[in-house]
Amino acid sequence: MKPNLGIPENHLQVISSELNKLLSDEFILYTKSRNYHWNIEGSNFSEMHQFYERQVNEINDMIDDIAERIRTIGFYAEGRLEDYLKLTSLIEQPFTNSQNDQLKNLLGSHETIINNLRRLITLFADKHKDVGSSDFAVQLLEKHEKMAWMIRAHLSGH
């Protein structure tokens, strides 16, 4: 049963499509972060292992929130790896266990998502008249900006 949210179906379809692309980006970022959590090495292993774990958990929560937002507006969330890989705008770099390279890779992914979220905030509110999804994107933006700041703080020490 489709929800009656006061937003035309064609607008909700576009919003759903954009949210599924975002979901795909988040899932790729989650996978990168999980990979780095598993494969970090070095004298600060324990600190970085915990740092990556916190990032993984935060991204996992965002993934769930995005999927639930898609369902809230009456559409289905993507859930297949094949579809995530088709929809993502992120690049999977070659394997590395270099902390510096890992952090730079994650920072680049967060910044890509941040820039996309800025676009979506305006798109959702102005073009599609969905302030709920726009506000949702603002909340995600704030989380990614904080996570990127923490990564930059780690990088400044290298």
Image: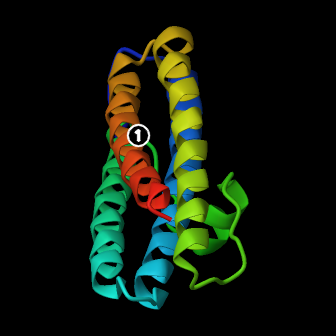
103 and 11: which one is in front?
103
Q: In the image, residue 39 lies at what x, y percent? A: 48, 89
Can you say whether 29 is above or below 44 in the image? above
Q: Is residue 136 visible?
A: yes
**Total of numbered circles in the picture?**
1
Can you say whether 137 is above or below 101 in the image? above
Q: Secondary structure at mark 1?
A: helix
53 and 102: which one is in front?
102
Residue 96 is left or right of residue 52, and the answer is right
Give the residue displayed 31% in from the left and 34% down from the top: 139
Mark 1: few, some, or many residues within 10 Å (few <14, many ≥20)?
some
Q: In the image, residue 134 lies at what x, y percent? A: 40, 23
| Protein image colouring | rainbow
Residue 100 is left or right of residue 145, and the answer is right
Give the residue displayed 41% in from the left and 60% down from the top: 154
Q: Amino acid at mark 1?
A: Glu
Q: Quadrant of residue 112?
A: top right
Q: In the image, residue 1 lies at what x, y percent? A: 34, 40
Can you say whether 98 is above or below 141 in the image? below
66 and 155: which one is in front?
155
Q: Quadrant of residue 58?
A: bottom left
Q: Quadrant of residue 6?
A: top left
Q: In the image, residue 75 lies at what x, y percent? A: 45, 44
Q: Which residue is mark 1?
A: 145
Q: Is residue 80 visible?
A: no
Residue 39 is left or right of residue 85, and the answer is left
Give the residue displayed 70% in from the left and 71% down from the top: 93
